[in-house]
Image (spheres, rainbow, N blue to C red):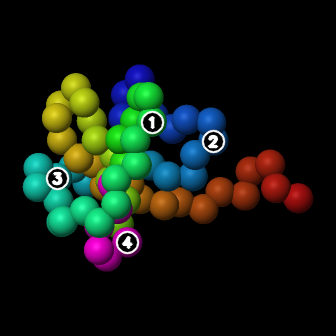
């Protein structure tokens, strides 16, 4: 799976890629993904193929909501 693809209707998409993002204050890992939160509230996803961090940009979607 490409890092820019969304999963299960996620409302975030890949933004900028950074070699050395800000200092992370929290890390979250699952079997297939690695996410980090910096002190400014920005969320990053690690791309294991390219060995880089990509900043996620939130987007609002009203699909499927009533």
Q: Is residue 38 magenta?
A: yes
In three-dimensional space, the C-alpha distance between marks 1 and 4, rounded to whole angstroms, equals 20 Å
Residues in magenta, as a range: 36-41
Residue identifier under label 1: 30
Q: Residue furthest bottom?
A: 40
Drawn side of residue 40 relative to residue 17, left or right: right
Residue at the spot of label 3? 18
Answer whether residue 15 is visible to the viewer in this image.
no
Query: Residue 38: x percent and y percent?
Result: 29, 67
Which residue corresponds to the image point at 16% horizontal and 35% vertical from the top-left? 51
How far apart in space, not on screen, are marks 1 and 3 (Cα)?
Answer: 21 Å
**Residue that label 4 marks:** 41
Residue at (18, 66) in percent of width and height: 22
| Callout 2–callout 3 Cβ contact below 8 Å | no
* Drawn side of residue 6 relative to residue 15, left or right: right
Q: Nearer the viewer, residue 18 or 38?
A: 38
Q: Earlier in the sequence, mark 2 or mark 4?
A: 2
User: In the rendering, which numbered label is found on residue 9?
Assistant: 2
- Dividing the picture into quadrants, the one containing residue 34 is top left
From mark 4 to mark 3, how far is it between C-alphas?
16 Å
Tally the numbered discs: 4
Q: Secondary structure at mark 4?
A: loop
Point 27% across, 35% down: residue: 47
Return the disc, 4 or 3, that comes first in the chain's sequence: 3
């Amino acid at each position: 799976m490409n890092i820019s693809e969304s999963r299960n209707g996620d409302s975030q998409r890949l933004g900028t890629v950074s070699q050395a993002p800000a200092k992370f204050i929290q890390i979250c890992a699952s079997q297939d993904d690695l996410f980090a939160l910096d002190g400014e509230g920005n969320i990053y996803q690690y791309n294991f193929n390219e060995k880089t961090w990509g900043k996620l940009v939130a987007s609002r979607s009203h699909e499927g909501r009533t």
